[in-house]
Image: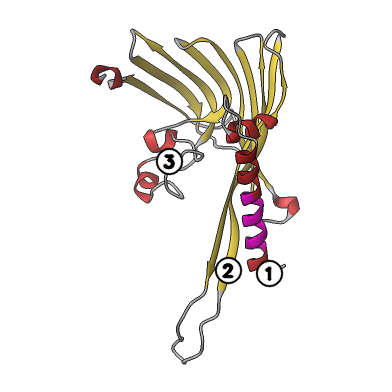
Amino acid sequence: MSSLTRIAIYTLIVGLVCFSALFIQAEEKSGFDKAWSYLTLYENAESNFQKFTLAGRAQLDAVWVDPDGLDEEDNALENFSDTRWRRFRFGAEAHMFDTWKLHLEANFDLNEDFSDWYTNLTDAYIQWENSKKLKIKAFKQSAGFTLDGDTSSKRLLSLERNNLTNNLWFTAEYFNGLLVTGKFAGNFSYKASFFSSGGAPEFDWDGASWFTFWQLGYKVKDEFK
């Protein structure tokens, strides 16, 4: 299958998904919300096991260039087309007992052969949250250092994080450790963490150094209302 054919197929798939989401749009819920709701395989607010849903992301880059010109030997330039998976992650999360969440998600490189698809775990944590005042996450998770590092790749406004940021913080993002976050006194928020610096694909506790970071914030948005 040629690269141009693959681009056409991927574009068609994305277009069909968007069209389907718009077609099933309901007044109380947007079409995209309705489409993503199919990833929730189980939900029962009255049960001890409240929810089970699939999680992940798929980000595909595609390029097709039709140059109008000649090379150094006056030959017509050839068309260029290519596709590449920027990210593909897949996993699931479960919500239970009103305050607990289990999240397992892995990173896959679909540019490689099938046997080499699996790369590493990105999330494998247990979370307890009784209110907005206190949330505790343990085991493999995103360290979220700096604003750029704490911004999910699902919410980036550009194709990738900027190179300046990559030189200011460690580009490894997922570590094993403990993270405590919450809010207090109205608009104040805090974050405290303790992580292993091993950076293993799964879990790594022995033979590694440790690092910690703390954060204190204040939400000023309400002051200007």
Q: Magenta stretch: residue 10 in it?
A: yes
Q: Residues within 10 Å of mark 3 (few under 14, many from 20)?
A: few
The image's mark for residue 78 is none
The range drawn in magenta is 6-15
Are the residues tagged 1 and 3 within 8 Å (C-beta)? no
The residue identified by callout 3 is 170
Left/right placement of residue 42 relative to residue 210 reads right
Q: Where is residue 31 drawn, in percent x and y?
A: 60, 35
Quarter of the N terminus within the rendering:
bottom right
**Towards the viewer: 52 or 176:** 52
The residue identified by callout 1 is 2
Sequence-wise first label, 1 or 2: 1
Q: Amino acid at mark 1?
A: Ser
Left/right placement of residue 137 relative to residue 106 reads left
Q: Amino acid at mark 3?
A: Phe
Residue 133 makes an appearance in the image: yes
The image's mark for residue 81 is 2
Q: Residues within 10 Å of mark 2 (few under 14, many from 20)?
A: some
Q: Where is residue 109 drawn, in percent x and y?
A: 64, 50
